[in-house]
Image (tube, rainbow, N blue to C red):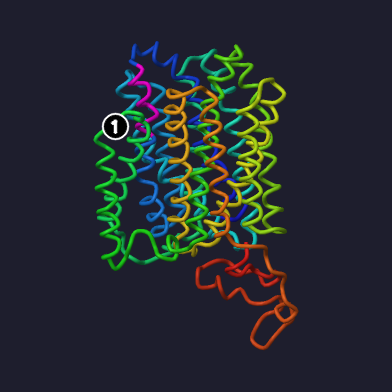
Amino acid sequence: MNRPLTLASSVAGAVVVALDGTVLTVARPTMQRDLDASLAQVQWTGTGYLVAVAGLLVFAGRLGDRYGHRRTFAVGMLGFGAASAGLCWAPGVGWVIGLRVVQGVFGALLQPATLGMLRTSFPPDRLRTPIAVRTAAIGLAAAAGPVVGGALVTAFGWRAVFLLNIVPALLFGVLALASREKTRPTVDTPLDVPGSLLLAAALACLAHTLVTLPGVSWSAAGALLAGAAFVRHERRTPVPLLPPAVVGSPAVGASLGLLVAVSAALNGALFACVYLLQDDLGLTPLHTALLSLPLAVLLIAAAPTAAILLRRAGARATVTGATAVLAAGLLVLAEASGQAAFGVGFALLGAGFGTVMVAATHVVVHQAPAASAGVAGALQQTAMNVGPVLGVASATVLMELGTARSPLLVMALAAAAALPVCRALPGRPRPASSTSAAPSAGLPAGGSDAPHTNHGVENDPSRHSLRDHEV
């Protein structure tokens, strides 16, 4: 696919997944009444999807590296759309849970591919803008989801929320399959099936453990055992599932940790604020949603701003400042007593989170070789799936032990404690030297893109590419 279509496909895949989660949230009470289901059964319509996604993301990313990101994206989108169509006619809650698990399997295929396609289609020095566009689209979908979902449920019932996914999923899935571009594997190494199964078991058990907190389930022991077995296997296998070039990078590890931390803080804070605003201040659900709109607006606005900051200040300064802004927003929310203060807190939270998401995702995708773009994208998506579950689970426990404001203070401290991790990120980009700008023997004008040519990334001789220390 050409670059505009690749970017459109990446955005469409990310938006479909974001919309699916947000519109279903407002549909669950109606679904429970219509299907005469228990609260636990309705919760499993989300938990089943989450466990499937968390368990298969990394393996799906490796499939994209092996067989082509366009192909795995197409299969993921078509399967996601087909599962959505099935949900529209599901006869009972058991069918809904089963189809949501199937939807999670295909969601795991398409999510890493949305980043993998960008990494292999755009030169490293042009990744900031596509990632920023993708992040802004996710923010817009997350903001519009509850409103659109509420309107559909009110007018047509809970089944209508799944109709949103069908047309874009099938359209972009067919376009990806119809592309005449020859798909060639970006890596010829065999798949690590035992490692994939062990990691899938560890992540699935971890997701199940988090969503069942504060209770203790069998899945906690399963996650520990499968995780230990996976680490032991990875150290011994000649072809590991997680390439050392990706997981061995301090910058990638720091970025993934920060994504988990800020997404946990954001979602835990939102969970607590819903109860704080409605139970303590007596606001209606609609008033609560309107009061939190500054978060969505600033998250969308932060995406293009983050791309500029990355170019001028580098990832380290950008993420450090944005994490501090996010922590400040949490503190404002924890101390807020009026609606204006809550609006300011939500705005700071959105600005900080949106900037960190763009910058940290850029580091993960940029630092990873193109041959491992799928794994890098899968790790980013895994962090963005584990973080919210961890945040909501932590907020639930803290609210049971204290008040609705307790999670906000703890999340603020956790965000502040993550600031030292930012030091592992790349610093400010170094200006091109005069020697690199001038033609030299055997090199085209504009310098060489040698650090990236072996990764299969298209070069642009008219621009200076970023080196490994640059962002």
The part of the image, by quadrant, that contains residue 289 is top right
Q: Residue visible at 60% across and 47% down?
A: 356
Image coords of residue 417 (percent x, y): 54, 46
Image coords of residue 64 (percent x, y): 42, 55
Q: Which residue is the site of mark 1?
A: 216
Q: Is residue 133 visible?
A: no
Q: Quadrant of the N terminus?
A: bottom right
Q: Is residue 393 above or below residue 28?
A: below
- For numbered disc 1, what is the local secondary structure? loop
Q: Is residue 346 visible?
A: yes
Within-10-Å neighbours for mark 1: few <14, some 14–19, many 20+ = few
Q: Is residue 364 above or below residue 104?
A: below
Q: Is residue 185 above or below residue 262?
A: below
Between 457 and 394, the residue placed more toward the observer is 394
The part of the image, by quadrant, that contains residue 346 is top right
Residues shaded magenta: 39-49
Q: Is residue 59 above or below residue 434?
A: above
Image coords of residue 5 (percent x, y): 59, 50
Q: Residue visible at 60% across and 43% down?
A: 135
Between 273 and 290, the residue placed more toward the observer is 273
Q: How many marks?
A: 1
Image coords of residue 233 (percent x, y): 26, 59
**Within the magenta stretch, is there residue 46?**
yes
Q: Residue visible at 33% across and 62% down?
A: 240
Report whether 70 appears left or right of 51: right
